[in-house]
Amino acid sequence: MSPPVAPPGWSRWLVPPAALSVHLSIGQAYAWSVFKPPLESALGLSGTQSALPFQLGIVMLGLSAAFGGTLVERRGPRWAMTVALICFSSGFLLSALGAATEQYWLIVLGYGFVGGIGLGIGYISPVSTLIKWFPDRPGMATGIAIMGFGGGALIASPWSAQMLESFGADSSGIALAFLVHGLAYAVFMLLGVLLVRVPRAPASAAGRPAPSAGVQVSARSAVRTPQFWCLWIVLCMNVTAGIGILEKAAPMITDFFADTSAPVSATAAAGFVALLSAANMAGRIGWSSASDLIGRKNIYRVYLGVGALMYALIALFGDASKPLFVLAALVILSFYGGGFATAPAYLKDLFGTYQVGAIHGRLLTAWSTAGVLGPLIVNWIADRQEEAGRHGSSLYGLSLVIMIGLLVVGFAANELVRPVHPRHHVTAPDPEESADVARQQ
């Protein structure tokens, strides 16, 4: 499947909707916490066990993005979106079978492994294309698409809750909900497959970037630079801090106010998940667009520094004020989403557009690591605290302190980012890399 080249007069503003159709679909991953309580009840799982499909999905997202990044660059966005559609929808269908037969390993395999591959390929599928279409506003362009991934739960959370209410929260009801998800998302993602186009661009000599293109670094060279690994730490710390709340959002707000005069119902908790998704989505377009004005390094100072302050407020005063808890969580999730959306533009600033999609794919291994760390820290500590007889907000105190420390580490790594040394710049074409670039163009 060759990349579809835009005909003369094609509007670049048709590309973001194509990207959004895929990202809004795979963004359902952020609504996983809605399925956690029903699965725990129906299959007798602990909080740590019920988080496993989500954790594995995020691990596979990073790994498939890293190993498939160069292939996505070579084959183009339509191929990548097609692979994402098949894997993501198949993951739900396998999960439906697992829930119907009460075989939890099938849910882990389907949603986590197969669906996770769809997450990774789908996530990076439009990034390089969007940066090529919008060289003047890369932060805004990637923010528009990646906004969809953050906003997917805004649709999926209430939709999933309504299906579980209608079908039932037992294993057969969960299976039917998974089945509907798989079929509906397949149709929606198909719109992106049919609509996406790559821009026409004259190939430079020998497949190399044009001399006027500024700093250009290949994916192979980028991973050998300290800048790449500083950004890896920055992204990993920011994601760990955000995903820890997001994955356990519904049970967390319920626990925080369980002993108060105004406990949080299951419906309200699902609404909280939707609010977090809205903040995640708004942060992706708002903060990434702001980075075009104030710079990537400065915006990450905000994400990490102010994010640590928000966690401190939750740890100290969260259980005393529901509005404070909700507001601080919304700010944290807006930074979490903004960090994702700004990362491709940060990479473009440091390494150029030559193989930015492949470099971005390798960077997303930080997300894989964070996808394990964040839920593991929050769930494991909460389970241990519950075994010790604690309840309410005390289940999460230690987790919040750990998150503050991780954000401080990320802040320090961001301060170490400097321009890439000229020895890493592309000067002579690598035959394989040149062939890839020629195919893209």
Image: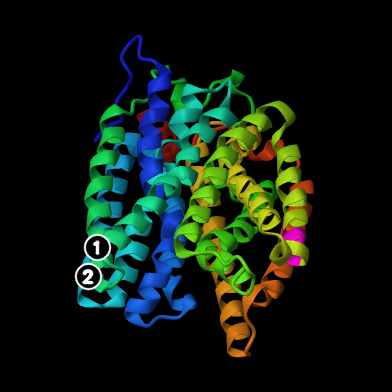
Query: In the depicted view, which residue is nearer to us: 64 or 182?
Result: 182
Circle 1 or circle 2, nearest the eye: 1
User: Relative to 241, does residue 431 appear above or below in the rendering?
Assistant: above
Q: Where residue 282 appears, x then y in whole percent?
A: 56, 38
Query: Which of 172/340 is in front?
Result: 172
Colour approach in the figure: rainbow
Magenta region includes residue 382: no
Question: Mark 1: which amino acid?
Answer: Phe
Residue for point 50% across, 39% down: 147
Compared to residue 357, the image places residue 260 above or below, namely below
Q: Which residues are magenta?
A: 311-315
Q: Is residue 312 magenta?
A: yes
Residue named by callout 1: 167
Q: Is residue 223 left or right of residue 398?
A: left
Quadrant where the C terminus lies? top left
Secondary structure under badge 1? Answer: helix
The quadrant holding residue 70 is top left
Report x, y in % for residue 42. Answer: 32, 77
Do callouts 1 and 2 mark residues in contact (Cβ within 8 Å)?
yes
The percent position of residue 348, horizontal first and vertical second, equals: 59, 34
Give the residue at x 42% y 28%.
Answer: 16
Q: Nearer the viewer, residue 328 or 416?
A: 328
Pointer 2 residue = 172
